[in-house]
Image: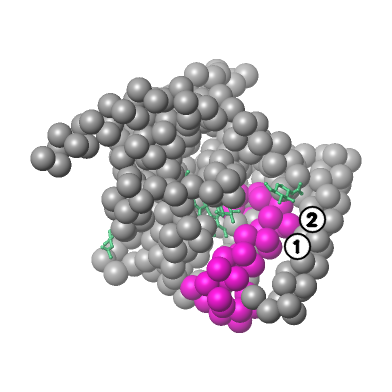
């Protein structure tokens, strides 16, 4: 990377971070959005009315991210998952999930940089996001590692069922919810088992934090609600009547989100899973002889 782009990235990142702090403060002083009015008027999904769900057809592009696949399955971004502009992605993840504007700008810029495209002019196909160790990484919650399953749009249903059976919490309306601890526990297990069964396993600290931030959306945006998670993760479908559980007027900021992410990441204890990992490695070996 040239000096000019490193310097401009630095100012870009510093600018986004200050913007994020400002939004976090505004969220503290302004009232939350009313229940039933979280998705903005005029955007698909307003009042819980999501456009028709259609699973992907032969030739459509999908990726390892359930939230983006779900937007394509509802036609919020192109149903084919192709030729999506980074700018359009920014606006749509904001309106659909109520992530803050700072985050919604940061991630598509990051993806454009990763794919060596122009944020403002170029487009991408969902499948291109699966560049290994770009954003996509090993020890994900719902996908086998790339070395074992090169097609990262393929869900690994046993992992999904295990996560959906893990929640130990209840919210104040009596719904079963996934907690921070449940999520740390399951991430620890995935990492220990992936490390033992994938000889090409790699997971930098950077990707660990990415992994815990991606999975922390299950707690924040989806409020840990297991009934909603089943739909979004297993079918990549937004439930009828759903809206983001984040009701802050300026959406989920990175500063606010970081608290959940760090709580999840610091709760991960891979060592607790040494036995499960050995067992998985042993099964792998007997299966391959
Ligand atoms: C521009 C926006 C986004 C991009 C480029 C993106 C990209 C990705 C990628 C590449 C993965 C796979 C990571 C892995 O290997 O585990 C992923 C996973 C995931 N993403 Fe996204 N994503 C975006 C927005 C979102 C949003 C808005 C949500 C939630 C509302 C979300 C929720 C998730 C979840 C739950 C996972 C699974 C985590 C795991 O398996 O450990 N993503 N995303
Ligand atoms: C990847 O997997 C998905 C879902 O399992 C499937 O629909 C798609 O056709 C596969 N793509 C390729 C290129 O094999
Ligand atoms: C959130 O955490 C990431 C690293 O995990 C850091 O780069 C970023 O500056 C933090 N953002 C804010 C707004 O605190
Ligand atoms: C929603 C979310 O936290 N997405 C993150 C997933 O991880 C990538 C990098 O691996 C980040 O760029 C996204 O912000």
Q: Residues within 10 Å of mark 1 (few under 14, many from 20)?
A: few
Q: x, y percentage for residue 168?
A: 50, 19
Q: Is mark 2 within 8 Å of ligand 3?
A: yes
Observer-nearest of 1 and 154: 1
Query: In the image, is residue 8 above or below residue 271?
Result: below
Query: Which circle marks residue 17 in the picture?
Result: 2
Give the camera-side residue of 120 and 78: 120
> In the image, is residue 74 above or below residue 211?
below
- Residue 150 visible in the snapshot: yes
Q: Is residue 149 left or right of residue 71?
A: left
> Residue 13 — which label?
1
Circles 1 and 2 in contact, beta carbons < 8 Å: yes
- Residue 133 appears left or right of 99: left
Residue 109 counted in the magenta span: yes
Q: Secondary structure at mark 1?
A: helix
Q: Quadrant of residue 12?
A: bottom right
**In this view, 173 is above or below 25:** above
- Indicate the position of residue 169 as horizontal and vertical percent values: 54, 19
Is ligand 3 less than 8 Å from the beta carbon at label 1? yes
In the image, which residues are magenta?
95-124
Q: Residue at x 40, y 65 (%)?
A: 127
Disc 1 from disc 2: Cα separation: 6 Å
* Figure quadrant of the N terminus: bottom right
Q: How many marks?
A: 2
Work out whether residue 211 or residue 103 is closer to the camera in this orientation and state it.
211
């Amino acid at each position: 990377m040239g000096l000019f782009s490193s310097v401009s990235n630095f100012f870009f990142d510093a600018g986004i971070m200050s913007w994020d702090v400002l939004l976090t403060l505004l969220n503290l002083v302004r009232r939350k959005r009313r229940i039933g009015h979280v998705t903005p008027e005029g955007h698909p999904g307003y009042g819980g009315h999501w456009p028709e769900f259609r699973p992907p057809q032969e030739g459509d592009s999908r990726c390892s991210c359930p939230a983006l696949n779900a937007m394509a399955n509802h036609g919020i971004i192109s149903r084919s998952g192709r030729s999506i502009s980074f700018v359009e992605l920014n606006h749509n993840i904001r309106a659909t999930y109520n992530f803050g504007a700072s985050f919604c700008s940061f991630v598509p810029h990051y993806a454009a940089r990763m794919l060596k495209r122009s944020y403002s002019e170029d487009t991408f196909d969902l499948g291109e996001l699966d560049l290994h160790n770009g954003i996509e990484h090993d020890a994900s919650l719902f996908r086998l590692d790339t070395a074992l399953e090169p097609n990262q749009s393929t869900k690994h249903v046993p992992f999904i069922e295990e996560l959906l059976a893990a929640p130990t919490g209840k919210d104040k309306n009596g719904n079963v919810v996934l907690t921070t601890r449940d999520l740390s526990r399951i991430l620890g297990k995935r990492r220990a088992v992936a490390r033992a069964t994938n000889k090409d396993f790699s997971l930098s600290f950077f990707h660990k934090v990415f992994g815990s931030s991606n999975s922390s959306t299950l707690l924040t945006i989806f409020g840990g609600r297991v009934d909603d998670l089943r739909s979004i993760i297993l079918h990549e479908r937004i439930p009828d009547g759903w809206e983001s559980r984040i009701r802050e007027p300026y959406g989920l900021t990175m500063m606010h989100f970081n608290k959940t992410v760090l709580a999840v990441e610091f709760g991960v204890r891979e060592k607790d899973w040494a036995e499960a990992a050995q067992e998985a490695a042993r099964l792998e070996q007997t299966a391959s002889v």
